[in-house]
Image: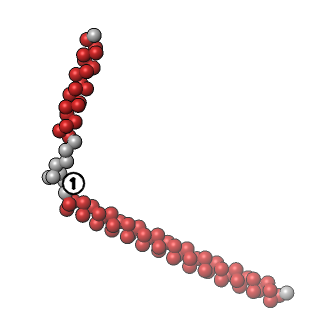
């Protein structure tokens, strides 16, 4: 019987403490408009840099493939000219 009472007390305290933490306070840093604008600006800058890096890599791959294609075309032309 004593263990049942001991188990109920922490649950009651937990239920009462939830009311205090569920409200959003206007002065909190994470909820302020200035913070979210700054955070969004950082995320946008990161995304732009990341996309620019991906584009640079893709352009380099395209150039490498063009060179490879040109070499293969030369070999093909040589083989066809010998026949």
Residue 1, image x and y in percent?
A: 28, 10
Total number of numbered labels? 1
Please, is residue 73 above or below residue 32 in the view? Answer: below
Which of 78 and 32 lies nearest the eye of the viewer?
A: 32
Q: Which quadrant of the structure image shows residue 31?
A: bottom left
Q: Which quadrant of the structure image shows residue 62?
A: bottom right
Residue 42, image x and y in percent?
A: 30, 64
* Residue that label 1 marks: 31
Which of the colour schemes (rainbow, by chain, secondary structure, one colour) is used? secondary structure
The residue shown at (64%, 78%) is 68
Please, is residue 80 above or below residue 30 in the view? Answer: below
Q: Which residue is most to the right?
A: 83
Q: Quadrant of the C terminus?
A: bottom right
Q: Which residue is most to the bottom?
A: 81
13 left or right of 56 in image = left
Q: Which residue is most to the left?
A: 27
The residue shown at (17%, 38%) is 20
Q: Which residue is most to the top?
A: 1
The residue shown at (28%, 15%) is 4
The residue shown at (56%, 79%) is 63
Please, is residue 47 above or below residue 74 in the view? Answer: above
Which structural element holds mark 1? loop
56 left or right of 33 in image = right
User: Is the residue marked by circle 1 packed among few (<14), some (14-19), or many (20+) residues within 10 Å?
Assistant: few
């Amino acid at each position: 019987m004593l263990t049942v009472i001991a188990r109920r007390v922490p649950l009651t305290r937990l239920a009462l403490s939830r009311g205090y933490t569920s409200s959003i306070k206007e002065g909190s840093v994470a909820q302020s408009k200035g913070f979210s604008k700054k955070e969004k600006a950082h995320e946008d800058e990161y995304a732009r840099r990341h996309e620019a890096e991906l584009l640079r890599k893709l352009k380099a791959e395209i150039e490498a493939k063009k060179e490879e294609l040109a070499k293969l075309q030369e070999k093909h032309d040589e083989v066809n000219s010998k026949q």
